[in-house]
Image (cartoon, rainbow, N blue to C red):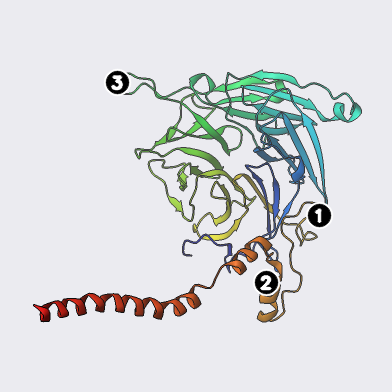
Amino acid sequence: MKWTTANLKHANYTAKHELFVGTHTGSFKHLLPAADQNPHAQSNLSELSALDKESRVTSLAFGNEAQTEILLGRVKNVAELHSLGVGGGVTTRSIAFTGAPIVGLARYNNNLIAGIGDGQIQSMSLAAEEEAEEEPATASVIIKTGDQMDHLRQCPTATNIVATGGKARQNNLKVYDLSADGKQIFNSKNLPNDYLQLEVPVWDSDIGFVDGPNVLATCSRHGYVRLYDTRKQRRPVTHFASEEHGMSFAALVAHDNYIYTGTTMGALKAFDTRRMKTHVHTYKGFTGGISDLHLDETGKYLSSASLDRYVRVHEAESTVLLYQCYVKSKATKVLIRELSEQQQQPRQSSDDEDEVEQDVKSHKSNKNKRQLKATPLDAEYEDMFDQMPTVGDSDEDEAPEKQTSSAAKRKAPRQTLKTKKKKQ
């Protein structure tokens, strides 16, 4: 499919998916690509009136294996737990932490685990907060990982394992066991010094679990992708180092033997863990930096959020762009999941930005009329054009007068010159 900036849906995209998108302005949106009437309709799952400058979505993850709970973190110290009902309803619950921003969320044993940007991992008991709603319990600090954290990721197969990563050597990849009171079970080690005996810069911007809790992959803003095996050694077992200038990896997701990475320059690439010397796939269609990636349960469909305000779905193996939707704000986080059979329409909310038209099978003339009626008219804009004089009419009236006067002026001096010659 050719590159385009319009909303599109590939004819071969028949999978029943729904997308959840967090944006830079703080809005939390729901998209339904599987809808037959309007696959690009959007509905807001959060109140737009309550958003401020610190409402930017910085973390988005599923809270359980059934994917019926969504954990949402923001720049401020408030996390949200959204429970998705079977009939399409959404219930929201807010949990306050003592630090900000929230860069990662996880749920373990009825506790909400949050990774804070200053390097702390805090835990909040959801049961204790339900019992004391007037005086919520304070979050307890389990682990102090360092002085900075970029991301916290929970292992999908072993929920008691979490991994953190950040900028600088003291904030490199670390793995913790929540079942053992936050005991550190792995601490990565940097590569040897370069040929100038200088330390290789470290910045683990995102983390992904490849094969259970033992194999992890990290990407860096410094342009490398590394693969770790906690059972073998502390240093990477294999890695990819980009020689291109400006190859800065910002997002990562892994499945089976493949690692998918997105850069700040709008490049989405796939790597094979069996040979990491170069990438094996390149996905096109981006005009802005990629902020987040997420795979469905099968690993066949790759969803991406980009700073060009588009959310896209690619087929992971063939790299074909299947779905693209403009979400009106810079997309920072995205989730994709299989659509249940009972959920066939977008989820209802009080602050919907777009209303889905129900009569789609009408004629083209009716569609054009609805589009004209839907577009609002600006009264000041119309009055300004009504008060403007018509340029064409004024030119036609004034044109002959200007020609006659100019012709008379040109002829007058010629006649005077001729009379002067005769007199001489």
- 138 or 349, which is in the foreground? 349
Identify residue type, mark 2. Answer: Leu
Tell me the residue at 69%/76% (across/down): 369
Q: Position of residue 412 (x, y in %)?
A: 25, 77
Is 21 displayed left or right of 165 in the figure? right
Tell me the residue at 67%/24% (across/down): 177
Q: Earlier in the sequence, mark 1 or mark 3?
A: 1
- Residue 109 can be seen, yes or no: no
Identify residue type, mark 1. Answer: Gly
Which residue in the structure is indicated by mark 3? 196
Number of numbered discs visible in the structure rendering: 3
Q: Earlier in the sequence, mark 2 or mark 3?
A: 3
- Element type at mark 3: loop
- Element type at mark 2: helix
User: Where 107 sits versus 347, above or below?
Assistant: above
Identify residue type, mark 3. Answer: Leu
Tag in front: 2 or 1: 2
Which residue in the structure is indicated by mark 2? 372
